[in-house]
Image (spheres, rainbow, N blue to C red):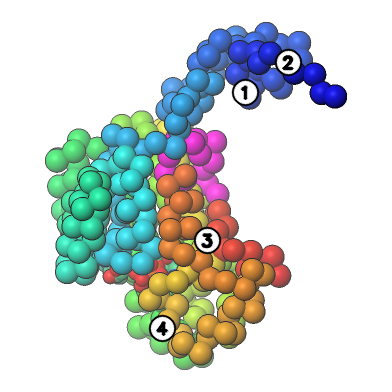
Amino acid sequence: MAQKTKAKSVPPGPARAGSRRQALKLGQAHPAWAADADARTGDAGRADSRDPFSLQGRVAMVTGAARGIGLAVAERLAVLGAHVVLTDINQEGLERAEAGIAAEKGSAESIRLDVTDRKDIARVVDKVVARHGRIDILINNAGICINAAALDTTPEVWERQMTINLDAVFFLSQAVGAHMVEAGRGAMVNLSSFAAVVDVRPQKHIAYSVSKAGVAHLSKVLASEWAKSGVRVNAIAPGFVMTDMPLGAGMEMHDIWRKFVPAERFLHPYEIANVIAFLASDASSAITGQLIMADGGITIW
Ligand code: NAI
């Protein structure tokens, strides 16, 4: 029969890794690593951290927040304590989204932003920083998907797809990144897609897929450039999520796509929002420059 032992006050993590090590006092860095103890982990690097997932006191900006994944992310970040700045081109949807968060006692405001308009980007970023002093979290979520096979992809289709899905992510990251680098902290999460790593069937959207592969690599390079400044940049690759966007390929796709997913189900926007909230929080302070697959297993096969 297993003997009951009295719980020792040894913190989880580093102190348990080596048997000959001294138990650390709560919150204390390992003595041999004192010079490397880095305040930029926020609270998460401490053994006595109670809630590294909390976003209390953070200012978060979300693009494309009027509906779908962006709306779910805005709601989730607000629930975890962040003040959320919702942006979108859809003014009516924005107002509805802001009111929804306020009704749940979350802290939110909305500002119209067309992510393809660089003057608009500068105006909105300046406004948020003037009002709050900083932006701690940026979620580059706004995007469109144009279905067109390679031979049908006109220069206009290609450019429109890249302008919204890739160029805008760079220019907004640049504008917000300047403030984060100066502040010495920040977390960005960019919406890529499983289409960045495999070809999606049976519909065809080469420009969309390439734009999302670009987002993944852009995130990696920004993460590399800004790591020393305490700014983390990650990308997330959702599978099929139940929003308006995939419906553009036609309702008949549902039954076809379902067979491609090991669990034979589509994802809820909140399942993506949870992963994004984690990547935006100090709980993920060890993760930067990654493309996190949140695809329900669709890329297993
Ligand atoms: P959605 O179409 O439901 O919502 C997109 C939002 O972006 C809308 O509110 C729209 O008004 C806004 N938007 C579009 N153009 C804009 C612009 N120029 N400026 C500002 N806002 C603009 O799409 P969904 O499904 O919520 O997708 C969100 C992100 O997730 C997109 O980047 C998408 O590519 C990505 N994604 C979605 C998947 C899915 O299955 N739904 C799968 C993988 C990635």
Residue at image mark 3:
237
As measured in the structure, the alpha-carbon distance from the residue carrying label 3 to the one carrying label 4 is: 19 Å
Residue at image mark 2:
5
- State the quadrant of the N terminus: top right
As measured in the structure, the alpha-carbon distance from the residue carrying label 3 to the one carrying label 2 is: 44 Å
As measured in the structure, the alpha-carbon distance from the residue carrying label 1 to the one carrying label 2 is: 17 Å
Give the x, y percent position of residue 187.
40, 42
Q: Is the residue indicated by label 3 positioned so its CB lies within 8 Å of ligand 1?
A: yes
Residue at image mark 1:
12
Tell me if label 4 and label 1 are in contact, CB under 8 Å: no
* Residue 90 appears in the rendering: yes
Q: Earlier in the sequence, mark 4 or mark 1?
A: 1
Q: Earlier in the sequence, mark 3 or mark 1?
A: 1
Quadrant of the displayed image that contains ligand 1: bottom left
Badge nearest the viewer, 2 or 4: 2
As measured in the structure, the alpha-carbon distance from the residue carrying label 2 to the one carrying label 4 is: 59 Å
Element carrying mark 4: loop
Element carrying mark 1: loop
Is 284 within the magenta? yes
Identify the magenta region: 279-290
Residue drawn at x 76%, y 15% as measured from the top left? 19
Q: Is the residue indicated by label 1 positioned so its CB lies within 8 Å of ligand 1?
A: no
65 relative to 222 in the view: left or right: left
Query: What's under tag 4, amino acid-wise?
Result: Gly
Give the x, y percent position of residue 22.
67, 8
Q: Earlier in the sequence, mark 1 or mark 2?
A: 2
Judge the density around disc 1: few (<14), some (14-19), many (≥20) Cα neighbours within 10 Å.
few
Judge the density around disc 2: few (<14), some (14-19), many (≥20) Cα neighbours within 10 Å.
few
Q: Earlier in the sequence, mark 2 or mark 4?
A: 2
Residue 88 falls in which quadrant of the image? bottom left
Q: Earlier in the sequence, mark 3 or mark 4?
A: 3
